[in-house]
Image (spheres, helix red, strand yellow):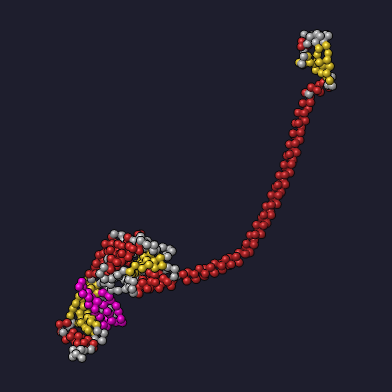
Amino acid sequence: MSNNVISVSQFNTYVHNIFLAEELLQNIQLYGEVSGVSYSGNNVYFSIKDEGAVLNCVKFGLRVGEYMAKEGEMVLVRGSPNYYVKGGRFSFNVSKIEPYGEGVLYRQFLELKNKLEKLGLFDPARKKPLPQNIRRIGVVSSETGAVIQDIIDITSRRNPTLDIVLYPAKVQGIGAESTVVAGIEALDKTDVDVIIVARGGGSAEDLATFNTEVVAMAIANANKPVISAVGHETDFTIADFVADVRAPTPSAAAELVSVNITKLTETMQLNAVRLLRLVDQFFSNHEERVANLITRAQNSTILYLQQESANCANLNSRLCNASAVLLQNVQHRFDLIAQKLENLNPVRILRMGYAQLENAGKVVSSVKDIELNDTVKLHLTDGTVGCKVVDKEVKNDI
């Protein structure tokens, strides 16, 4: 075995001692932008970074009221480098932390936020509502990891009829924003009802993809409603402000787009039971009233029919009386006319002994219409007699 082969413990201890021995590295000050803050008891783990590098830091024993920077702030830290032998990890042990201006990433975030806000991309009036009946969901996210699996698990449990279409995209690193944009544009042309842009939690640098203008414009230009589900509940990105709906986590987004069929069914059944009880209670409370109304309706109907029957009888009597009077008047008039006709009847005159004289087919009404020796006809009631004129006398005074 070679003499320069050593154990891991020996190597890590050697590296640890190098940092301890270097006096120039003890109790030094560094500045950078805070990222990835997390807490474990009174200990704070975070990173400081600039445009070229990242340094892991730890602050042990943070006291109550002691200043601790937030994500994106620029800080000045004092401390010493340390190499953790057992875990083989390098970190900078911070003894003191102070504000040191505004972070670059945070400043860029604010500048882009103000720009897009002036363009109206955050205006609630342009936000599209989520569809009432969602059948197919488009997801832009990494095809590996817990995010897409959480979305699938939650939607499948709540509503197994939903379809999920995944567009695999890079969610961090170089070129990530272009794949997210491509995913939004591709799913927007399909038959999905809604698009979820999702990523798990991380530092401000990890979420940088969703703080870019190209991703914001892709979300704003989408025809389908877009839900931003990036990071944890306390994380806010530009995508959250532009999206139609912001979900605090990818899991929350899955719940937003999936109706819980089981609970919906239970609620409908419970409402049906309540409705039946209300109907029964209503009829029970109003049964006597309904019976009274029916009796009143029946009595009113009988009284109405009786009144109408009496009216009909009265009208019938009046009609009969009027008809009798009318017939009497008609009969009287008929009798008068018949009498007049009888008086004018020529046959009646003939019965009284008068005769009608006819000469050559013409009725003779004057002595002047006949001459001596003319043969005339004498019409009586029971026949005709032919006569010869033997005498004629004209009276001039008629």
Q: Position of residue 57 (x, y in %)?
A: 24, 79
Assess whether residue 178 is covered by the magenta stretch.
no
Q: Is residue 267 left or right of residue 109?
A: right
On-image quarter of the N terminus:
bottom left
| Position of residue 293 measured from the top left corner of the image (x, y, whole percent) | 63, 59
Residue lying farthest to the front in this orientation: 1
Q: Nearer the viewer, residue 5 or 61?
A: 5
Image position of 330 (left or right of 95):
right
The reply to whether residue 269 is visible in this rendering is yes
**Residue most extreme to the left:** 24
Q: Position of residue 148 (x, y in %)?
A: 36, 72
The residue under the point 22% across, 69% down is: 104
Q: Which residues are magenta?
A: 35-63
In the displayed structure, 103 sits above or below 218; it is: below
Q: Residue 260 is drawn in which quadrant? A: bottom left
- Please tell me which residue is depicted at 67% across the width and 57% down the height of the picture: 298
Q: Is residue 70 visible?
A: no
Position above or below: 6 against 350: below
Q: Is residue 248 left or right of residue 386?
A: left
Q: In the rendering, at what x and y percent does residue 239 appear?
A: 31, 66
Pick the residue in front: 148 or 355: 148
